[in-house]
């Protein structure tokens, strides 16, 4: 390789590593003008184009796999570029090739599982994510996706199994514990759900989240009509926040125990709807945290 190609590749890679994707892309493309088949420059051009949302990503990465057909990483990048271009079939084909070339890479299996799910192959997605979870016990990414995909398909008990394994591996995982609590609530496993919410009171110390958790605990007790315990939690809730839902819950639960009081309470259907919305709000807050962490 001549010195000019080494310089172009080095400068383009440095720019990419510094997240200067426009400069990286420009340098890589400029270098390719001198040698169109240079694998390093093709890789940088394709990856920088992906970061910039350019359609040219698939072109450069397609040329790269022609030059390096045994490079699993190149096939993975091509798969992700095709996914960004809404080519689900092409993305799955490329990612499947990447997994065949490097079957021990759990992250590639997770990507393949996601793409397979988007393409409607739920069983294949489940298989790939389950294998990824088995291969990488220290990484709960696959289990998080597996639980959510199963939930969306209505396989609640299977979703609980994945969430339970996630929490076993990562006991401090707030989102996983919250998911397990909600899944158990959905299936009517009230004692298990309440245990998870109690655990959340220890894990989720973000300011303002205590109200979300106590409202969820009240919801569990309403579901199983343990009105005395629901009242105890409602009283605790009044010390945690001034949310309108708290005062309505206090009135509603009091009415169940003592009959209609001076303060009218919303009907049960409305209370349950608002509690579900409150849980969704809490879940969204932690989903934003996970998205920021890239997990």
Image (cartoon, rainbow, N blue to C red):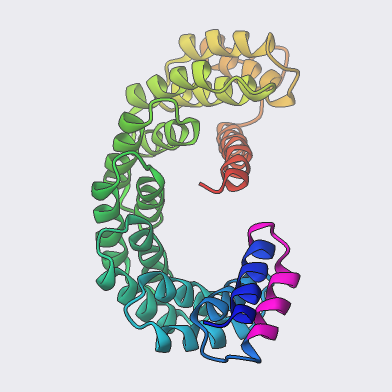
Between 192 and 57, the one lying in front of the other is 57
- Residue 153 percent coordinates (x, y): 36, 58
Question: What secondary structure do most residues of the magenta stretch adopt?
Answer: helix
Q: Is residue 32 left or right of residue 79?
A: right
Quarter location, residue 278: top right
Magenta segment includes 20: yes
Image quadrant of residue 177? Answer: top left
Please state if 111 lies on the left or on the right of 137 as rendered.
right
Q: Give me the residue at 25% from left, 72% from top.
A: 100
At 29% across and 36% down in the image, what residue appears?
Answer: 165
Residue farthest front in this picture: 3
Magenta run includes residue 18: yes
Q: Is residue 26 above or below residue 278?
A: below
Left or right: 87 as drawn, with respect to 18? left
User: With respect to residue 138, does 104 lie above or below?
Assistant: below
Rendered position, 87 above or below 257: below
Q: For the point 62% across and 66% down, which residue is it?
A: 13
- For residue 114, above or below residue 171: below
Residue 173, position as x, y percentages in the image: 45, 31
Residue 107 place in picture, x, y as percent:
38, 57
Name the residue nearer the viewer: 176 or 111.
111
Which span is picked out in magenta? 17-31
Name the residue at 61% across, 42% down.
284
- Quarter of the figure with residue 206: top right
Q: Nearer the viewer, residue 33 or 280?
A: 33
Count of marks overlaid on the render: 0
User: Looking at the picture, how far across and down is residue 273, in whole percent?
Assistant: 58, 39
Q: Nearer the viewer, residue 29 or 56?
A: 29
């Amino acid at each position: 390789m001549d010195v000019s190609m080494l310089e172009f590749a080095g400068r383009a890679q440095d720019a990419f590593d510094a997240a200067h994707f426009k400069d990286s892309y420009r340098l890589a493309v400029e270098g390719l003008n001198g040698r169109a088949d240079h694998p390093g420059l093709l890789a940088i051009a394709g990856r920088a184009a992906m970061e910039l949302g350019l359609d040219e990503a698939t072109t450069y990465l397609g040329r790269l796999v022609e030059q390096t057909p045994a490079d699993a990483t190149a096939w993975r990048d091509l798969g992700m570029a095709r996914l960004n271009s809404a080519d689900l079939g092409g993305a799955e084909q490329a990612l499947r090739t990447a997994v065949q070339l490097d079957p021990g890479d759990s992250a590639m299996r997770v990507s393949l599982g996601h793409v397979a799910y988007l393409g409607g192959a739920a069983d294949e997605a489940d298989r790939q994510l389950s294998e990824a979870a088995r291969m990488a016990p220290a990484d709960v990414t696959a289990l998080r996706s597996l639980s959510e995909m199963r939930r969306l398909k209505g396989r609640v008990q299977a979703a609980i199994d994945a969430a339970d394994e996630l929490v076993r591996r990562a006991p401090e995982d707030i989102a996983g514990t919250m998911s397990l609590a909600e899944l158990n609530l959905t299936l009517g496993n009230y004692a298990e759900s309440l245990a998870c919410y109690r655990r959340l009171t220890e894990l989720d110390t973000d300011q303002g989240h205590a109200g979300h958790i106590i409202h969820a605990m009240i919801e569990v007790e309403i579901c199983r009509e343990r009105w005395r315990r629901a009242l105890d939690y409602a009283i605790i809730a009044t010390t945690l926040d001034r949310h309108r839902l708290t005062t309505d819950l206090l009135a509603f639960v009091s009415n169940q125990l003592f009959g209609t009081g001076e303060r009218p309470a919303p009907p049960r259907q409305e209370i349950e709807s608002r509690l579900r919305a409150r849980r969704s709000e809490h879940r969204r807050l932690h989903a934003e945290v996970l998205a920021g962490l890239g997990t």
